[in-house]
Image (tube, rainbow, N blue to C red):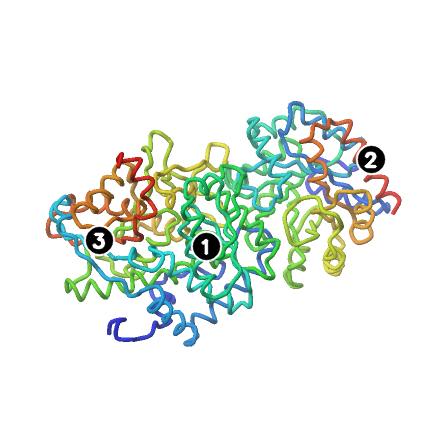
């Protein structure tokens, strides 16, 4: 049955429920990664979120409401689009896009925020806070908060507020308060620090609507489960469209939510290769990149044990990417685990490679992708040339590029 | 006097002082905050500190308010690092009271818990506080700390439920760090109402020294805190003065007012 026939999400659709043995353990550990490295004051709140989520994901009424919102508000299921003109540059391999760019607010982030906003109401809380880098998760959170009548405060680095003034205006229009963060590097990691400080102070009234699969347990699991619908749909759609599973699935990796969203339903399919593409920025050798998995080392950042970019003294290094959504010096612990287990492979894509793919998709297919997603597109081009014309590659087109027009105008002198 | 470099010495030292009826004072300084920063330690000891907390600054101090954040940034911008701070301590004059390092877990993991604890030991540090390491994640570090003779003090929060609080009290070494409120470090207008209840709940399960921290910045607050706890930790009130340019002598004078308040109560 396809989702369009009106079937409900099942608990198994929402979560792996251990089907592949890939849920974290009771302490939120994926192997050695994950866990809860947070102040003691937050532990009871995290316990409460975990317990409520466990009830919610087995509650038909919750699943029905989430499913209803995904269909009638977010615009699911999203379609697949085959892109043959684009694929001419990929050695003739078939390239098929999962169109998360067509969702409401224009990126996969809407899936997670709708699920967590529903969870916030179940928790009896009236206020949500969130961090945002480029502003996409902030806009999505402000959207869900407006829809459900929740007070909403978004923390955003002061540098990012300037770079993404349009998204700041969108959040304000949606009724959110945007707090510019002037500490540290004034970017996403400092916005997360500040959101944690708010949460530890206001935890009774407030849910921290975390935007990616990083952070302390249970956020990596919850955000993954709410994003998992991407892969559940795509797997079914691939079978309908091509009669087979793809040879490879490609996705961009910053914190890692869109990648885990499309990977997760394929983890048990051993013949499907999983490729994640991190932001190579100006190149590994320049030191200006966000190659957390490919060039980082194991540490603890924002409550989770995972790969991080850190200097020889253990201080976090500021990342760089032309794409604000991938500009983060940490990564979700499940990706760290998938990397170490060998189930997924991670690569770097430079700013220049991503921008080339960005322009190519626009010109050959009439689709302007987010620069984040363009990293996955650039990866698919390389992979197609490696695998040859018999290969079929599924790419998560996680968001649309409207928000990136300022960057594109500068980059291409438009 | 107890040997303050012997294993478990922080707790023995604090218990001994507590048992004389003395209110315990543990001021905090961010390591590497200024040239010659170890002179603050001597001044703290002269003012009557019973132990001194030395912060090893981290780039992402999620539990710290504006003052300690600024102190951490300032120290890091000066080139402070765990290695250099510990070298300064090893070279500086022994202040004569136990030193307790505090830092975030990434800096502990960076060298590995065993090497980190051994380095503390070599620098003459006897205790350790890691505010982002809750009790159920602490096994690895607790073992390494015990092996190196470092007292790993755990933190308790007003939100911590009773069974968990008992585990924290049982597994903490040196003292139990009672976080007086739900929030970050920083000065406050009044001692939080949650402080009294939390310390009472901790005391039900342990006779280990209980130090109250977060938001204790004036003699009046220290006096009130002393009614509930064995002593106080004073961080932001010290570091605001340091950031404003106060030298060791100024801090000795300020801490002497807290010492006096604790002695009166």
> Which dot marks residue A173?
1
Q: CA distance from mark 3 to mark 1?
A: 40 Å
Which residue appears at 57% of the width and 42% of the height?
Answer: B61
Disc 1 sits on a residue from what chain? A
SS at circle 1:
helix
Please say if A235 is above or below B207.
below
Residue at numbered disc 2: B256
Q: Residue at x 81, y 31 (%)?
A: B253
Q: Is label 2 in a helix, a strand or a loop?
A: helix
Q: Chain of mark 2?
A: B
Quarter holding the C terminus of chain A is top left
Residue A5: mark in rendering: none
Q: Where does residue A6 sit, x and y in percent of width and height?
A: 29, 75
Specify few, some or many for label 2: CA neighbours under 10 Å numbering under 14, 14-19, or 20 or more.
Answer: some
Quarter occupied by residue B115: top right
Within the image, what quadrant is residue B49 found in?
top right
Q: Is residue A192 left or right of residue A293?
A: right
Q: CA distance from mark 2 to mark 1?
A: 53 Å
The residue at which mark 3 appears reads as A248
């Amino acid at each position: 049955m396809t989702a369009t026939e009106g079937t409900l999400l099942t608990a198994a659709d929402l979560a792996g429920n251990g089907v592949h043995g890939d849920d974290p353990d009771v302490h939120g550990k994926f192997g050695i990664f994950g866990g809860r490295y947070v102040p003691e004051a937050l532990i009871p709140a995290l316990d409460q979120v975990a317990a409520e989520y466990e009830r919610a994901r087995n509650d038909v009424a919750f699943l029905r409401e989430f499913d209803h919102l995904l269909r009638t508000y977010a615009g699911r299921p999203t379609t697949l689009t085959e892109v043959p003109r684009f694929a001419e540059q990929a050695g003739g391999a078939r390239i098929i896009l999962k169109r998360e760019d067509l969702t409401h607010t224009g990126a996969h982030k809407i899936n997670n925020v709708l699920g967590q906003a529903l969870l916030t109401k179940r928790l009896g809380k009236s206020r949500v806070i969130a961090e945002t880098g480029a502003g996409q998760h902030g806009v999505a959170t402000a959207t869900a908060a407006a829809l459900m009548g929740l007070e909403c405060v978004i923390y955003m680095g002061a540098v990012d507020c300037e770079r993404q003034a349009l998204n700041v205006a969108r959040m304000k229009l949606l009724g959110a308060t945007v707090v510019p963060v002037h500490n540290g590097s004034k970017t996403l990691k400092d916005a997360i620090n500040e959101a944690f400080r708010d949460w530890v102070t206001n935890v009774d009234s407030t849910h921290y609507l975390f935007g990616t699969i990083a952070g302390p347990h249970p956020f990596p699991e919850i955000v993954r489960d709410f994003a998992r619908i991407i892969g559940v749909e795509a797997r079914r759609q691939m079978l309908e469209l091509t009669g087979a599973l793809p040879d490879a699935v490609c996705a961009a990796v910053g914190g890692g939510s869109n990648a885990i969203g499309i990977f997760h339903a394929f983890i048990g399919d051993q013949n499907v290769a999983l490729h994640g593409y991190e932001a190579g920025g100006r190149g590994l050798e320049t030191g200006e990149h966000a190659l957390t998995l490919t060039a980082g080392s194991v540490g603890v950042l924002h409550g989770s044990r995972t790969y991080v970019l850190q200097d020889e003294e253990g201080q976090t290094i500021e990342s760089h990417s032309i794409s604000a959504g991938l500009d983060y010096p940490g990564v979700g612990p499940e990706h760290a685990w998938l990397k170490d287990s060998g189930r997924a492979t991670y690569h770097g894509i430079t700013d220049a490679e991503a921008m080339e793919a960005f322009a190519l998709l626009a010109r050959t297919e009439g689709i302007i992708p987010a620069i984040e997603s363009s990293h996955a597109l650039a990866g698919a081009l390389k992979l197609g040339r490696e695998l040859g014309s018999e290969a079929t590659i599924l790419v998560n087109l996680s968001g649309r590029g409207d928000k990136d027009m300022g960057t594109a105008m500068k980059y291409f002198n438009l | 006097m107890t040997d303050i470099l012997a294993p478990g010495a922080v707790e023995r030292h604090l218990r001994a002082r507590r048992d004389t009826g003395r209110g315990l004072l543990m001021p905090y300084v961010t390591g590497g905050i200024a040239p010659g920063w170890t002179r603050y330690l001597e001044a703290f000891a002269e003012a009557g500190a019973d132990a001194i907390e030395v912060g090893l600054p981290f780039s992402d101090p999620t539990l710290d308010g504006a003052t300690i954040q600024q102190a951490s940034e300032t120290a890091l911008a000066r080139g402070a690092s765990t290695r250099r701070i510990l070298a300064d301590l090893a070279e500086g004059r022994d202040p004569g009271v136990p030193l307790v390092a505090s830092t975030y877990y990434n800096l502990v993991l960076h060298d590995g818990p065993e090497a980190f604890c051994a380095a503390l030991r070599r620098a003459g540090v006897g205790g350790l506080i890691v505010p982002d390491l809750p009790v159920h994640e602490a096994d690895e570090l607790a073992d390494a700390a015990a092996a190196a003779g470092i007292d790993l003090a755990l933190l308790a929060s007003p939100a911590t439920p009773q069974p968990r609080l008992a585990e924290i009290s049982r597994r903490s070494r040196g003292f139990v760090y009672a976080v007086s409120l739900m929030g970050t470090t920083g000065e406050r207008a009044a001692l939080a109402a949650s402080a009294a209840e939390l310390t009472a709940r901790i005391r039900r399960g342990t006779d280990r020294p209980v130090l109250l921290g977060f938001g204790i910045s004036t003699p009046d607050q220290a006096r009130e805190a002393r009614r509930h706890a064995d002593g106080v930790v004073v961080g932001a009130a010290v570091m605001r003065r340091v950031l404003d340019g106060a030298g060791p002598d100024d801090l000795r004078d300020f801490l002497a007012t807290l010492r006096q308040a604790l002695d009166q109560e």
